[in-house]
Amino acid sequence: MLIFLSINIPQDYNRTLKTTSYNSSLLGLKFKNPYSGLRNIPKNIWVLSAATLINRAGTMVLPFIALYARQEIKVSTGDAGLVLAFYGIGAFISSPFSGKLSDKLGNLRLMKISLFTSGLFLIAYSFVSSFILFLILSFFWAVLSEAFRPASLSFISNEVSPDRRKTAFALNRLAINLGMSIGPVIGGLLSSINFSLLFYVDGITSIGAGIFILFFPWQNHEKDKKLIDETHSKSIKKESVFRNKKFIYFMLALIPVEMVFFQHIGAMPLFIVNELGFSNATFGILIAINTVLIIFIEVPLNESMRFWEDWKSLTLGALLAGVGFGIMAFTETLSPIIITIVIWTFGEMILFPASGDFVAKISPRKQRGEYMGYFQMSFSFAFMVGPWLGAEVLEHFGSFNLWMGCLAFGLISTLMMWRLKGK
């Protein structure tokens, strides 16, 4: 005990206690508040995250839309699946165009347009009884609602200093996941009362998020940014995104692991419920592990990794995602399934904020919305193809081959991300 009493306490100990970072002379350890980096996130990012939370807390139509088509419009199970496919096609097609539009109109303006129009559209959506018309409207709903994503990603990229982008993207994902943990739960309750309520509540929260953005006092940097853009407009020429070889290479590297990730809404529930015999409720609890980890860990994790080189974060994220889904081939009980979910969730928490940060770095500022549109397009493509392909492989080739295929796709992305070191 005398040894510990003889430790010299630094003279600035009292001052140190008042900060969020704590240095201990004991054993040379350094302790830091994992959320201290949020103090450096600009006000505008917090406002955008709050609006995103409002919007996502009302997300209940999309998770139940196939069930709505099956029960209310009385179509077959296969036809009900077409609704998600049409939504995915709309999101895929709209992403690059909405990205370009955000560069022309401004990110905030396009976000407002997206929130208000999609909210009004959702309310009218509930009165449709024709399945063909329902499919067509699903396509246009995706066009309107998904226009928000590239604009918000571009807005974050422009508002935050490069060393804080990963943390800012993680904060935005936190708002999304918090909202998504609320919306579907309320949607399940409302659907048991009246399915149309889902459309009304989802539409109202979308409009509410638009009103929040419209009337909240933003820190306005647009005039300064416009002046800078006009000053350099003669020396900066826009070039086609497809001439940026690094960006195209990155998109090709990202798609395989994105397809792997979307198995959590495609083949994974079929595998856990139908093949392993667990209940729907058990699967819901398992997926909640993913959400809880994101809520509590993603922001401090990305804050601690903000000085990592891009290729390191991207490689590690892709590797963990591929391995996490791959070792599901050897799982039959709950404990190993939980371990796999933890592994691929850490891959998700590292990969996706790092991906947004990387695209922001390699895109010209005047075309950042366009780049983010194509970046979002890769997710839409993976959403369209990944769950369908995974279900097909599971049905025709079995679960072992499915999860080994996920491992292979993850390793392909891992190797391609690692090659960014040389680029």
Image (tube, rainbow, N blue to C red):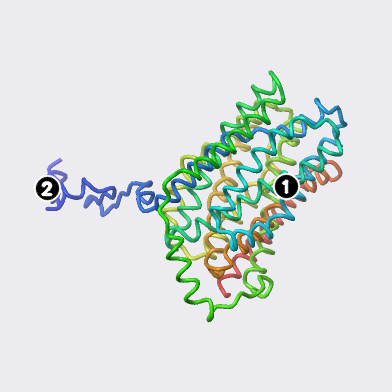
The residue tagged with tag 2: helix, strand or loop? loop
Point 50% across, 52% down: residue: 169
Please identify the quadrant where the C terminus is shown.
Answer: bottom right
305 vs 410, left or right, is left
On screen, residue 180 above or below 314:
above
Which comes before the other along the chain, label 2 or label 1?
Answer: 2
Residue under label 1, please give it.
403
Q: Amino acid at mark 1?
A: Trp
Figure disc tally: 2
In the displayed orientation, state which residue is furthest to the bottom: 235
Q: Give the quarter of the image for residue 421.
A: bottom right
Task: Give the vertical position of 350 relative to 73 (above or below).
Answer: below
Quadrant of the image for the N terminus? top left
The foreground one among 166 and 321 is: 166
- Rendered position, 414 above or below 53: below
Identify which amino acid the numbered label 2 is placed on: Ser
Given residues 53 and 185, the one toward you in this image is: 53
Q: Where residue 105 appears, x then y in whole percent?
A: 59, 59
Give the numbered dot on residue 331: none
Q: Residues within 10 Å of mark 1 (few under 14, many from 20)?
A: many
User: Which element carries disc 1, helix, strand or loop?
Assistant: helix
What residue is drawn where x is 60% and y is 47%? 344
* Mark 2 surroundings: few (<14), some (14-19) or many (≥20) residues within 10 A: few
Q: Nearer the viewer, mark 2 or mark 1?
A: 1
Q: x, y (%) of residue 230?
A: 50, 73
Instruction: Find residue 6 and name its label.
Output: 2
Could you tell me which residue is drawn at 16 percent across and 49 percent down? 13
